[in-house]
Image (cartoon, helix red, strand yellow):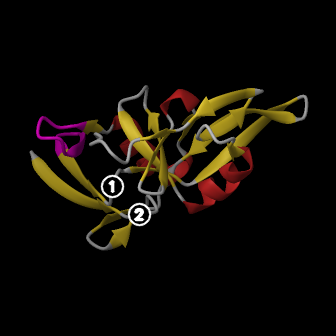
């Protein structure tokens, strides 16, 4: 089986041998097919080839959001990743660590970090009433857990 190695930078861009992968279909495939190997590394197996990913912190970086409104108020958030791969935000998995915001994706299997543009889009929905940071969405308050003091799994 042949091995290929990719780097994922802090903005979620994927590189092979110094060249950025920009084909949307390839990027979506990588993010949909990614799994963790037994030793914890990120892996996509395709047509007898192992594609290994070395991320800055996680291969899943939310690059932008699509906000959905109902009756003039925010009702839902769709996360958009490299290759325009998307999935809905589950606000129950929001975590803050080291000044960065994370959520869970792929049915909780992976941790995703909000990139700069996504954070700018999300900022109007964030609040802190003294009880801690939260996301205001669909008329509900979704707490953001601070996990800075404990070890987390990517």
Q: Quadrant of the N terminus?
A: top left
Q: Residue at x 61, y 55 (%)?
A: 119
Q: SS of the residue at dot 1?
A: loop
- Report the residue marked by disc 1: 57
Q: Residue visible at 43% across and 31% down? A: 106
Image spot of residue 146 (x, y percent) = 45, 42
The residue most toward the front is 130
Marks 2 & 1, CB-CB < 8 Å contact = yes
- Comparing 142 with 85, the one in front is 142
Q: Which residue is mark 2?
A: 10
Q: Which mark is residue 5?
A: none
Residue nearest the observer in this picture, 55 or 137: 137
Position of 124 with respect to 87 (left or right) is: right
Q: Which residues are magenta?
A: 36-49
Residue 109 lies, with reference to residue 59, above or below; the image says: above
- Does residue 73 appear left or right of residue 104 in this picture? right
Residue 55 located within the stretch drawn in magenta = no
């Amino acid at each position: 089986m042949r091995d290929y190695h990719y780097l994922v930078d802090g903005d979620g861009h994927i590189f092979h041998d110094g060249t950025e992968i920009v084909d949307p279909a390839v990027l979506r495939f990588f993010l949909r097919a990614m799994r963790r190997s037994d030793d914890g590394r990120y892996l996509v197996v395709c047509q007898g080839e192992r594609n290994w990913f070395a991320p800055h912190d996680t291969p899943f970086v939310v690059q932008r959001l699509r906000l959905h409104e109902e009756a003039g108020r925010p009702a839902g958030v769709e996360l958009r990743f490299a290759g325009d791969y998307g999935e809905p935000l589950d606000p129950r998995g929001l975590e803050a660590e080291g000044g960065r915001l994370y959520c869970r994706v792929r049915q909780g299997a992976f941790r995703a970090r909000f990139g700069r543009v996504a954070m700018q889009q999300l900022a109007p929905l964030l609040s802190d009433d003294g009880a801690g940071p939260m996301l205001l969405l669909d008329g509900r308050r979704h707490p953001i857990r601070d996990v800075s003091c404990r070890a987390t799994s990517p």
